[in-house]
Amino acid sequence: MSPDVASFSRVLSERADAGRRMLSRQQNSGRCARAGRIGIQMLSWGVALAAAGCGSGDAPVEVAPVSGIVRYNGVPVRDAYVKFIQKGCPIVAGGFTDDAGRFELTSYQDGDGAPVGKNQVTVTIMSRPPEQSGDLLRAAQEIEDPAERRQKLIELTARAKSARLAPPAVEPRSRIPSKYASDSTSKLSFTVEAGTENECELDLTD
């Protein structure tokens, strides 16, 4: 092969290599751009999903105080459990009615309220449970005097034994239609507003 032909072949080979490198860079750039667009879309969807939920991760759900009254055909309902349920929310608030039909809802701590936003509401007839032994035990353990604490624990043990032998709880004193026990049939809802004392009146009918 003459020197001129060899030189010409070498030039063609170098240009071909340069062309292949340029094409490879363009293809990689296109793939990165597409991956970036997909990543941005997924991030946007994630933000939208987080915004649509009641809470995210380990962050507590925002609640606000809620109290109110339950009436059935105009008469206050005693021995009822009021429950607030919010779709997609991990927290369910609830509270029992007293002799006047009034209730106060609890989510995390006694009387702190219900999740902010629109909640479905159910009302179920049931007697208020007896005082929780766990709460009593914690209260006894906080007594500083050893002798007094020991005596309190003995009383709690005797009370627990009596509770096991006691007859079943008395029947609830009020009656309401069973449809109010389910969020799919109660047709009750209430919107809890943040930063205010919410008053909820539930007027039940046949």
Image: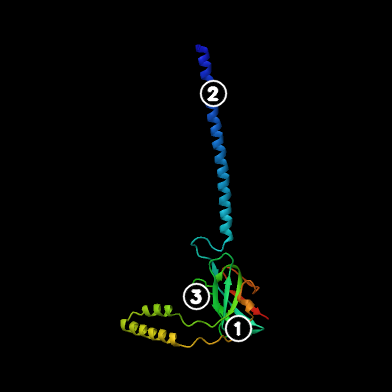
Please name the residue shown 57% across and 48% down the image: 40
Q: Is residue 62 left or right of residue 154?
A: right
Residue occupied by mark 1: 77
Residue 181 image point, x, y percent: 60, 76
User: Vertically, is 39 above or below 64?
Assistant: above
Mark 3 closeness class: few <14, some 14–19, many ≥20 residues within 10 Å? few
Residue 94 image point, x, y percent: 55, 75
**Quadrant including the C terminus:** bottom right
Q: Secondary structure beneath disc 2?
A: helix
Query: N-terminal of the two: label 1 or label 2?
Result: 2
Give the spatial CA distance, label 1 vs label 3: 21 Å
User: Vertically, is 17 above or below 77?
Assistant: above
Q: Amino acid at mark 2?
A: Arg
Residue occupied by mark 3: 110
* Residue 186 in which image quadrant: bottom right
Q: Secondary structure beneath disc 1?
A: loop
* Residue 126 in which image quadrant: bottom right
Tag shown at residue 15:
2
1 or 2: mark nearer the eye = 2
| Residue reaching furthest to the right | 206
